[in-house]
Image: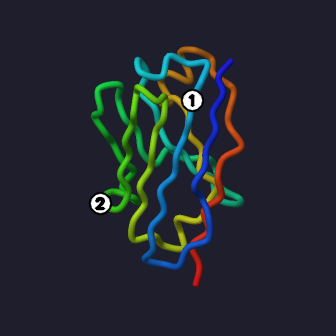
């Protein structure tokens, strides 16, 4: 049973920063590529950043240069540093394994997410 707990969201003004955290259990965290996803109202969940077990990162074009994903395998924790936030970044942010792992292992569990609102 995968358990994922996201935190760190909140209300921030455009141009501001937030740091999200994700603690994962029930999954061999250190061996699996992980990702941060977001879902805005009326939109599908999308992958915004992913990180391999060794630390290689990928980003959606919409966040490239502004967001930084990182992980601490010893703590089963993943982070998303978000800078230069824009109103269009407003969404509920979730963490999970990356899409290939989700599909291959049939993962259906998601955390509650953490709400990020970017507004003046």
Q: From the viewer's perspective, is residue 67 above or below residue 59?
A: below
Residue tagged 2: 65
The quarter in which the N terminus is drawn is top right
Disc on the earlier residue, 1 or 2 = 1
Asked if residue 21 lies left or right of residue 64, the reply is: right
Residue occupying the point 55% across, 73% down: 12
Residue 12 image label: none
Q: Nearer the viewer, residue 14 or 108?
A: 14
Task: Please name the residue that numbered disc 1 is placed on.
Answer: 24
Q: How is the image coloured?
A: rainbow
Identity of the residue drawn at 64% across and 52% down = 114
Residues at circles 1 and 2 in contact by the CB criterion of under 8 Å: no
Q: Secondary structure at mark 1?
A: strand
In which quadrant is the C terminus drawn?
bottom right
In percent of width and height, residue 97 lies at 51, 29
Residue in view at x 61 percent, y 44 percent: 6
Q: Is residue 96 above or below residue 1?
A: below
The percent position of residue 79, horizontal first and vertical second, equals 45, 45
The one of 86 and 72 positioned closer to us in this rendering: 72
Who's the residue at 70% across and 60% down the image? 41
Mark in the foreground, 1 or 2? 1
* Front in this rendered view, residue 90 or 12: 12
- Residue 101 screen position, x and y as percent: 50, 21
Looking at the image, the residue that sits furthest to the bottom is: 120
Alpha-carbon span between mark 1 and mark 2: 26 Å
Rendered image quadrant of residue 90: bottom right
* Pointer 2 local density, CA inside 10 Å: few below 14, some 14–19, many at least 20: few
- Disc 1 residue crowd, few under 14, some 14–19, many 20+, Cα 10 Å: many
Q: Secondary structure at mark 2?
A: loop
């Amino acid at each position: 049973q995968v358990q994922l707990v996201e935190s760190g969201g909140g209300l921030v003004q455009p141009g501001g920063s937030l740091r999200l955290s994700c603690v994962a259990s029930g999954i061999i965290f250190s061996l699996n590529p992980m990702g941060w996803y977001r879902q805005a109202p009326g939109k599908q969940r999308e992958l915004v950043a992913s990180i391999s077990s060794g630390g290689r990162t990928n980003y959606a074009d919409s966040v490239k240069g502004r967001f930084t994903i990182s992980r601490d395998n010893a703590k089963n924790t993943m982070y998303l540093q978000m800078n230069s936030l824009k109103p269009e970044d407003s969404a509920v942010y979730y963490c999970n394994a990356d899409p290939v792992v989700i599909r291959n292992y049939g993962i259906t569990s998601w955390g509650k997410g953490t709400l990020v609102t970017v507004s003046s």
